[in-house]
Amino acid sequence: MCVRILPKAVLCALILLSNSVSAQESEDDEVFELSPFQVSSDHGYRARRTTKTVPEVTVNDIGATIDGVNGPFDPSLKRAHGVTVAFAYGFYDDQELVRRETLNRYIDEVRKVLATHESLYFEPKELLVPEGDRKRGRNSRRSAYTSYAHFDVSFEFGDGASPFEKVLEIRKIVSAIGIQNDVTKLFYGGASLVAQKYRDTLLFGVGERYEGISRVDELGSSVPYVTDAIGRQLRMADPSVAVTLVKPADAVRIEFSLEVENLSEVERARSIEEALKTAQGAVESVQGLEFESGTVRLSKGEGVQGPSTRLSSYYAQALFSVRIPIGEGSFDLERVREVRQLLFEQDWADAELRFGAAALVVNNVDRYRSELLAAVFADLKAMDAGLGDLFEVVPSIENVRIQLRQASPTEVELWIPYSYKVVSVREREHQKDLFELELEKARAATAAALRETSKG
């Protein structure tokens, strides 16, 4: 056998070629640089480049978790109306067109699966596909061409299910679609609360309440606070004086809200108008009830039905209240329950009725000022008479608003802040004598000074 000795230059070239092929094969084994949920301030979600492969997160690892929520009684849940769960598919191919078409196909498949779940909303997000085809070589890493398709799945509160269990259910549904292979991976992002919209605040009369209106199951007759004639909550305190008046409130106001959701702006307006007419007709059919209209809000624009369309974004809301006069006669709080039941039993068609609180109404609290002052002075006069001739009561009345609190289910207790001092008549007369003596001395000194001046 004849063995040829290769020149040194040729041998070095073969070794370099061998190393290049080996390096390329090693790089081809690298599929992903993980963690596509790295947030960038200007580009949204971007792939994070790392020097090693991070283990893939699985459903069992993150389970039924919601970012920032510590448990089922976390107050954050009461201020939200739903949860959004984030996902992303990562996919690799040398060609940009294949990457883009494949990820779009994956997203369409997810959309079709989620469309069979009526309570879930699908929303496609960023599609991050690096430009250009990969040319295999030492400086062309596969991770630089890995592409990501982000999407969100969300749900709204209202069916009574635990939001944590719902999050876990969504993650399992997406995982069960089974779009995973050697070049495709499913990534699980966080679940976050969706805040309540501004439209959930309640207007009553022409005023605005600081609390939101909500659904209630109990059509009770509680009256938790007091308002003035236009619905502004009056400041309530505990009396710090001895003299107060107890007066019946002028009325009870019960608050309600009507809401319509429809993709058509014209239909939203029509439905909310019909619902308001139904409410007004029901109230005015009962003697002694007064209907008070409030603010009507109508979202603008037309929607297109689809699995990613949130119907709650296309709404109309009408606020109204029912006033029940109290007057000087007796009043049964059972009437509050009856009014709520009356409206609850109406046919609202496309509208949803929600219940607000009931409040006592005092039309003009300052109309009791003269009566209160008379009662205060009468009490101080009686105290003064009881002290005899040696002492006297000196009052101090503050010029502030009348204070009040709820005294009974239909009455309020009113008072004016005041104070008084008990002074000695003898001491006061002595101080008066001293003042007059000093005054006489001052007058004498002034007269003497004038005489001296005239002599000069």
Image (cartoon, rainbow, N blue to C red):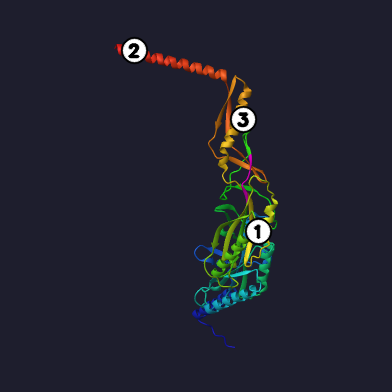
Q: Is any part of residue 200 visible from this angle? A: no
Which residue reaches farthest top?
455
- Most foreground residue, 58 or 217: 217
Q: Residue at image x 62%, y 74%?
A: 110
CA distance for labels 2 and 3: 54 Å
Residue type marked 2 = Arg
Residue tagged 3 = 379
Of callouts 3 and 1, the N-terminal one: 1
**Residue segment shown in magenta:** 246-252
- The kind of secondary structure element at disc 1 is loop
398 is higher (above) or lower (below) than 38:
above
Q: Residue at image x 62%, y 26%?
A: 383
Q: Which percent across, then down, holds residue 246?
A: 64, 40
- The kind of secondary structure element at disc 2 is helix
Residue type marked 1 = Arg
Q: Which percent across, then down, holds residue 403?
A: 59, 40
- The kind of secondary structure element at disc 3 is helix
**Which image quarter: residue 401?**
top right
Residue tagged 1 = 215
Residue type marked 3 = Asp
